[in-house]
Image (spheres, grey):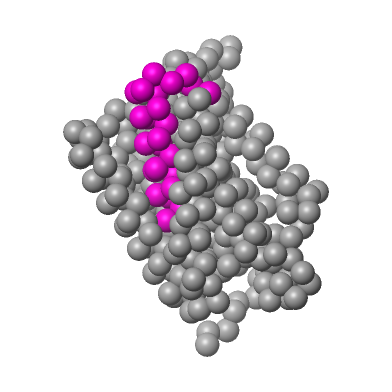
Amino acid sequence: MDVYFVQQVVNALSAGSLYALMAVGLALVFGILRLINFAHGDVMMVAAYLAAFSLFAGLPFPAAVAVMVVGAVIVSAVMERVAYRPIRGGPEIAMLLTSFAVGQVLENGTLLITRLAGQPTQIAFPTPDLLSGDIALGAISVSRVNVASFVSGVVLLFFVMLLLTRTRTGLSMHAAAEDLPAARLMGIKVDRVVGRAFILSAALAAIAGGLYASQAGQINPYLGFTPVLKAFIAAVIGGFGSVTGAVLGAYVLGFVEVIPTALAGIADLLPAGSVSPQVHDLLATVFPAGLGSYRDAIVFGFLILMLLFRPNGILGGSAREDMP
């Protein structure tokens, strides 16, 4: 049982790391522009396709990673310059709708390119050997991609925190997030700061896209919807607009997701005779074997409770905003 629960903790940390890479990108852009960039997940999808085609072409893994990250950064930079910058300062609903439109362009563009290339909609992702198989840690067996997800997440998030707190670019982002017009009056080049925020968020999304595709084993043009939705939930749980809150919310979400799977059929996993028959029957009733299939419902139920009792997130203030 100890090994089983440690295994579930590892799975939760792995999932939380992926969500954190996505949620931080969302929080960066929202903090500065008050834009919920739902096209962020499609940048992740594009990165996964770039990695797949690079590996299909025979490029070594490091070169495929470089193509994936650079390609995602270019897509995000063009997206910011062409779609978002012209409407900056306009109604927030206009920017939100624009993010949906950009996402549709990326999805349908990818679908068109794959069809012109003679590829099916669903493509098997060529997971590199470095991320294939399992690693035995004593009695615990952990997949290599889960280890890579956790390590990559921790390392990258550490460097993001250093960038945001110890560099001029990071301090400029903080100033722009606090008051964009005032930051412009103080001489901060707002266009450059916003562009760098999109570039940083795209690089994080690219790494998350490659790891997510390696876990899933297949990719399609709609790959980014579920991850960006989970990243949005993580950012809300932690406190939207807060990078630290996004990281915290991502790991909380990872554990909330894993709990139903860990407890599903727990009565049958207990050693024989360890509990009384009455307790065994109660556990079998409360935590049936099919509990894991309700994971998403449990996640959204948790989100509703958070919005009811802590509407501004774990690290947000407790006061509610007045409706206009």
Can residue 301 be seen from the camera position used here? no
Residue at (50, 78) in percent of width and height: 90
Image position, residue 289 (x, y; %): 33, 35
Residue 146: where, in percent of width, then height? 51, 27
The residue drawn where x is 53% and y is 72% is 88
Residue shown at 52%/15% (left/top)? Answer: 135
Residue 264 to residue 224: above or below: above
Picture layout, residue 219 above or below residue 44 = above
Q: Nearer the viewer, residue 91 or 308?
A: 91
Q: Is residue 143 magenta?
A: no
The quadrant in which residue 245 appears is bottom right
Which secondary structure type mostly characterizes the magenta part of the structure? helix
Q: Is residue 79 above or below residue 311?
A: above
Q: Is residue 58 magenta?
A: yes
> Can the viewer see residue 69?
yes
Q: Is residue 217 left or right of residue 195?
A: left
User: Whole-percent x and y of residue 180?
Assistant: 67, 72
In the picture, measured across the screen, residue 150 lies left or right of residue 291, that is: right
Residue at the image position 67 percent from the left and 52 percent from the top: 244
Residue 268 as seen in the image, left or right of residue 71: left
Relative to 60, is 295 on the left or the right? Answer: left
* Residue 76 place in picture, x, y as percent: 49, 51
Region in magenta:
39-62
Q: Nearer the viewer, residue 28 or 266?
A: 28
Counting the numbered discs, the total is 0
In the picture, residue 194 is in which quadrant? bottom right
